[in-house]
């Protein structure tokens, strides 16, 4: 019995532990290569490529926070393998969310960056192409890059604030 137990422990020490360490190190190396890439074309124009498998909204929000970007215009193309879109119902003043889990092309992503209650607020709409060449579109709540996501951002040298309008039920510009 003790011999079997010792053999199992030795097998774990010789094969499993090094394999786990190797997998950990490889994943760490891969994740360091999955960084967003950017280039500044002009003073106000930025080209941003989001990392594969990143979530678009959280990646873009983190980018804006890191660059202290409080206002801007966004457009983009790319591909995702899941997306949650929202549709606003003016009767109920609520969003209806729907998640799509399939490979889709970002035919168009457009929107803006502003501030709401002192935090970055992204207002993005997206048109997604399916493999049968049909499209779906709506307000983007979340999406996971699967391939590429190439964005063009035009910075605005002014803080654009938003406020909630209870009559409409939406966050609107507060000029």
Image (spheres, rainbow, N blue to C red):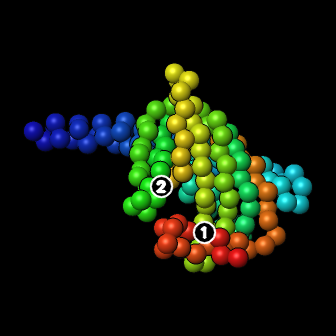
The residue identified by callout 2 is 88
In the image, residue 152 above or below residue 175: above
| Residue 77 position within the rendered picture, expressed as x and y whole percent measured from the top left | 68, 39
| Residue 68 position within the rendered picture, expressed as x and y whole percent measured from the top left | 72, 70
Does any portion of residue 94 appear in the rendered image?
A: no
Label ID, residue 136: none
CB within 8 Å, label 1 to label 2: no
In the image, residue 134 above or below residue 92: above
Residue at 79 percent of width and 62 percent of height: 155
* Quarter of image, res 9: top left
The one of 72 and 58 positioned closer to us in this rendering: 72
Quarter of the image for the N terminus: give it.
Answer: top left
- Dot 1: element: strand
* Quarter of image, res 3: top left
Q: How far apart are marks 1 and 2 (CA)?
A: 14 Å
Badge 1: how crowded within 10 Å, few (<14), some, or many (20+)?
few
Residue at 90 percent of width and 55 percent of height: 42
The one of 48 and 120 positioned closer to us in this rendering: 120
The residue identified by callout 1 is 172
The one of 23 and 40 positioned closer to us in this rendering: 40
| Residue 101 position within the rendered picture, expressed as x and y whole percent measured from the top left | 43, 36
| Residue 141 position within the rendered picture, expressed as x and y whole percent measured from the top left | 50, 53
Pick whichever of labels 1 and 2 is earlier in the sequence: 2
In the image, residue 162 above or below residue 47: below
- Dot 2: element: strand
* Quarter of image, res 70: bottom right
Does any portion of residue 158 appear in the rendered image?
A: yes
Left or right side of 19 for 104 = right
Quarter of the image for the C terminus: give it.
Answer: bottom right
């Amino acid at each position: 019995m003790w011999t079997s137990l010792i053999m199992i422990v030795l097998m774990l020490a010789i094969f499993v532990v090094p394999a786990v360490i190797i997998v950990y190190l490889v994943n760490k190396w891969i994740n360091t290569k999955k960084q967003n890439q950017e280039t500044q074309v002009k003073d106000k124009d930025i080209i941003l490529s989001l990392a594969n498998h990143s979530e678009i909204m959280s990646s873009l929000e983190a980018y804006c926070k890191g660059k202290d970007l409080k206002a801007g215009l966004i457009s983009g193309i790319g591909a995702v393998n899941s997306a949650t879109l929202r549709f606003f119902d003016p009767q109920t003043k609520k969003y209806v969310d729907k998640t799509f889990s399939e490979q889709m092309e970002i035919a168009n992503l457009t929107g803006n960056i502003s501030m709401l209650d002192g935090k970055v607020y992204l207002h993005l709409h997206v048109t997604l192409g399916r493999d049968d060449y049909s499209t779906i579109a709506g307000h983007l709540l979340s999406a996971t890059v699967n391939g590429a996501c190439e964005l063009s951002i035009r910075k605005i040298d002014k803080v654009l604030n938003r406020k909630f309008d209870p009559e409409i039920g939406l966050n609107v510009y507060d000029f």
